[in-house]
Image (cartoon, rainbow, N blue to C red):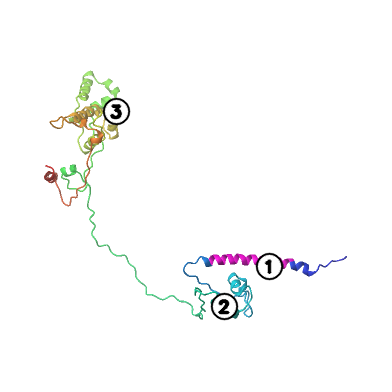
Amino acid sequence: MIVKILPLCWILIPMMKVKKLAQQERLAEDLRLLYVALTRSVYHCSIGIAPLTKGCRKQGNSDLHQTAIGYLLQRGEPGDADYLAEQLAILMATDNKSDDIAVSVVAALDKQIWQPQKSTKILLAAKTFTRQIQDHWRVTSYSGLQQALHSPVAPVAQPRDVVKSVATECLTKPTWLTSLNSDTVSKTVSLVNNLTPHHFPRGAIAGTFLHGLLELLDFSQPIDLEWLTDQLLKKGFDTIWSPVLQQWLTDILHTPLNETGVSLASLTPANKQAELQFYLPINSLLQASELDNLIKQYDP
């Protein structure tokens, strides 16, 4: 068997070229990164330089020349700490005409381990709130003043203040009419036909409902009975009041307000202000009569 031994140089030379090319590419990338880092500074830039070496070697040349900053300072030449100091001195003498670069040697390091300063413990406690808050207030109304309420909370009216009568039962349950005699039926129908605005439920709920109708109505248009019935159902009132309310509101809108004969029906929505809201601060008990006297001083 014949063993052919190749010359050693044939194997090592190509590998050395590859390593050299890789080293050059790495150095080129490091130089690019160094340029980016140095040119990003606006007011000041500090650079730490030391003759660093790989491994535990303490004597001889350092490996600084293989780095980007070392390659520029030592021009790619290896050297020790003295050589680095010499190159820095040359840089200061030749390339620092505008005194933009300063070299300072780091003082001897203090081997004492840093210890935080001991400070006395400060006891923290929340402050006690002592100010008086004036929060005993509420929003009332002219009706509330009229009632001379002595309690901060007004009594709540029943949500369905509706007259439950025989007429309502008859209209909602027509089968019940068959068991009644003709005299009872005629009296019931007569009662329904004779309902007037004076029979309409009273109280805050009913008053607010009527007030809301006048805010929503277009005074210049006829009152829609279907719309009125829907409003009654929404507020919990019996629809038996639909024709009564329709006639009642129609009379209100067409009643002359003064000697000229003007009425609410002559007002268009553009000329109508449903309610002018305002807030008047009241710091003590106030009666409706006192408020009337105050208003009359400025609006007789």
Residue occupying the far top of the picture:
182
Q: Earlier in the sequence, mark 1 or mark 2?
A: 1
Q: Quick check: 45 left or right of 161?
A: right
Residue 20 is marked as 1
Q: Residue at x 27, y 25 (%)?
A: 171
Task: Using the rendered view, name the quadrant where residue 238 is placed.
Answer: top left
Residue underneath mark 2: 90
x then y, percent, for residue 77: 64, 75
Horizontal side of residue 235 vs 16, given as left or right: left
Quarter of the image with the N terminus is bottom right
Question: In front: mark 1 or mark 2?
Answer: 2
Residue bearing mark 3: 226
Residue type at the position of mark 2: Ile
Quadrant assignment for the C terminus: top left
Q: Position of residue 102 (x, y in %)?
A: 50, 76
Badge 1 vs badge 3, beta-carbon distance below 8 Å: no
The amino acid beneath tag 3 is Glu
Q: With respect to residue 3, does 219 lie above or below?
A: above
Report how far apart the C-alphas of labels 3 and 2 lie in the structure: 103 Å
What is the secondary structure assignment of the residue under circle 1?
helix
- Compared across the picture, whether 29 is left or right of 98 comes to right
In the image, residue 147 above or below residue 99: above
Q: Residues within 10 Å of mark 3 (few under 14, many from 20)?
A: few
Contact (Cβ within 8 Å) of mark 1 with mark 2? no
Q: Quadrant of residue 89?
A: bottom right
Q: Secondary structure at mark 3?
A: helix
Mark-to-mark CA distance, 1 and 2: 29 Å
Local secondary structure at mark 2? helix
Contact (Cβ within 8 Å) of mark 3 with mark 2: no
| Nearer the observer, 11 or 93 | 93
- What are the residue bounds of the magenta stretch? 14-37
